[in-house]
Image: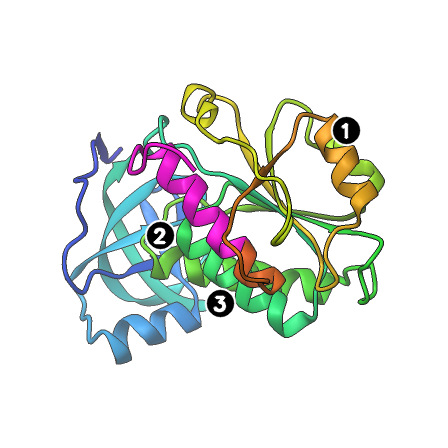
Amino acid sequence: MPARTERPSLPRPGQRRYWAAVYQESGRAWLDAAEARHALRVMRHRSGDRIEVIDGSGRLFEVVIGENEEGPGGERVLGGRIEAVHEADAAAALPWLVQALIRPARLEALIEGATQLGLAGVMLFAGEHTTVPARMTAARRERLLRIMRTATAQSLGLRLPELRGPVPFADLPAALTGFRIWVAHGPGAEASVAAPLAAEAKAPQALVVGPEGGLTDSEVALLIQCGARIIDLGPRRLRSETAALAGLTLISATLRGATPAL
């Protein structure tokens, strides 16, 4: 079995990670056609080069590229030999984004950007002001997962965020039990003092962002009854996706200790 070691903390310039089907028992990894094309044609890798591979589990694999061969499913894919396995940092804390459904193109851009920032997961919900269908087809879900996979690799992440929902807003209190809940609610809202966040960093953090029409006062009141606090994102009225990225940036920075408080 390949050796397990600690991962260097800083990425190298130009570093790129690839998604692969990983079979540790045989010490092999296989890149699908799209990933192989990027590795060979765009990044100009060749047989014998060492690349970094992820499978969404939180582990990082160092793989020496081999040749196109028959993969576990019988298809021709790019194979490689696993040389080392690096475990994820168990202490790393990532927030959840609890996002109201918005128009598909905006939601895709938001999920891509939020995944790059670092997420434990995305929970979609339908609120009173949601104006798009409150359902998710299998094809639509797979597209969002593909976006997450690409964004995870591009941003040198290790773990694929979970994707849950969509659920009705009424289900959120039960779904967020045990979370420290933050709400992005627009200008004029009375923002909570966020200094306690650092002391509660062990609790999973969740940012709730409403749809394009915003959360209703009754929805915000219900979240506050569940212990939620309002994040101050400044005096400007932000689009849903902008508020989500701004709020996630603040929460993530605080969890890393990069800023004293929200």
| Mark seen at residue 29 | 2
* Vertical position of residue 4 compared to residue 230: above or below: above
**Up-down: is 175 above or below 178?**
below
Q: Nearer the viewer, residue 81 or 179?
A: 179
Question: Can the viewer see residue 182 in this picture?
Answer: yes
Kindly report which numbered mark, 1 or 2, lies closer to the viewer in this rendering: 1
Of callouts 3 and 1, the N-terminal one: 3
Q: Does residue 25 appear in the picture of this structure? A: no
Q: Which residue is mark 3?
A: 75
Quadrant of residue 104 within the rendered picture: bottom right
Q: Which residue is mark 1?
A: 174
Say which of 154 and 245 sits in front: 245
Where disc 2 sits, the SS reads strand
Q: Position of residue 236 (x, y in %)?
A: 54, 61
Q: Which numbered disc covers residue 199?
A: none
Q: Which residues are magenta?
A: 244-262
Q: CA distance from mark 2 to mark 3?
A: 14 Å
User: Disc 1 and disc 2: Cα gap in Å?
Assistant: 39 Å
Estimate how packed mark 3 is, as few (under 14), some (14 to 19) or many (20 or more) residues with alpha carbons within 10 Å: few
| Colour basis | rainbow
Image quadrant containing the C terminus? top left
